[in-house]
Amino acid sequence: MIDMKKLSHLLILLFILLFLTDNSATAATTGQYGDVILNKNAASMREVGVKDVLFPHTFHRIRFKCKVCHNDIFVMKAGANEINMNVIMEGEMCGKCHNGIIAWEPIECEKCHSMRPGYTGGVVQNAKRK
């Protein structure tokens, strides 16, 4: 028979370990191999004073199969997706999951608009491992 008290303590310990080892916040600001810089709308983002979006593709890919996002939500072609805050807030594109139920709501700008200076390029650029 399973001791429920021991099981609950084990689950709490597991949660703490996962929380302490989850470096997604660090990954979102420094970039990891396979991550993507989304700067197609760089001009309008500069007008409102936000950084380019560093999309942690590796982080998402570890947790989900490709078909979750491609091709129903996003087209797998650089620059083919018209991503902007209006469609996200309406529950489309990133907003399909980032809705406050499946994942955090997109109301803290710096969680996505986190690209550090030093990267140049076009519509989509692979981030360099630091």
Image (cartoon, rainbow, N blue to C red):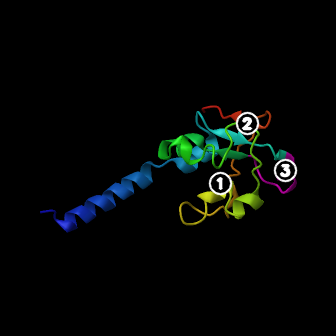
Residue that sits furthest to the left in the current view? 1
Q: Which residue is mark 2?
A: 78
The kind of residue on which mark 1 rests is Cys
N-term-proximal mark, 1 vs 3? 3
Q: Is residue 104 above or below residue 130?
A: below
Q: Is residue 36 above or below residue 43?
A: above
Q: Position of residue 114 (x, y in %)?
A: 68, 49
Residue drawn at x 64%, y 31% as measured from the top left: 128
**Callout 2 environment at 10 Å: few (<14), some (14 to 19), or many (20+)?**
few
Q: Position of residue 15 (x, y in %)?
A: 37, 58
Q: Which residue is mark 1?
A: 94
Residue drawn at x 58%, y 33% as measured from the top left: 33
Q: Position of residue 26 (x, y in %)?
A: 57, 46
In the picture, measured across the screen, residue 113 lies left or right of residue 64, that is right
* Cβ–Cβ under 8 Å for marks 2 and 3: no
- Give the structural element (helix, strand or loop) at label 2: loop
N-term-proximal mark, 2 vs 3? 3
Residue drawn at x 87%, y 54% as measured from the top left: 47
Residue 49 highlighted magenta (yes or no): yes
Q: Which residues are magenta?
A: 43-52
The kind of residue on which mark 3 rests is Arg
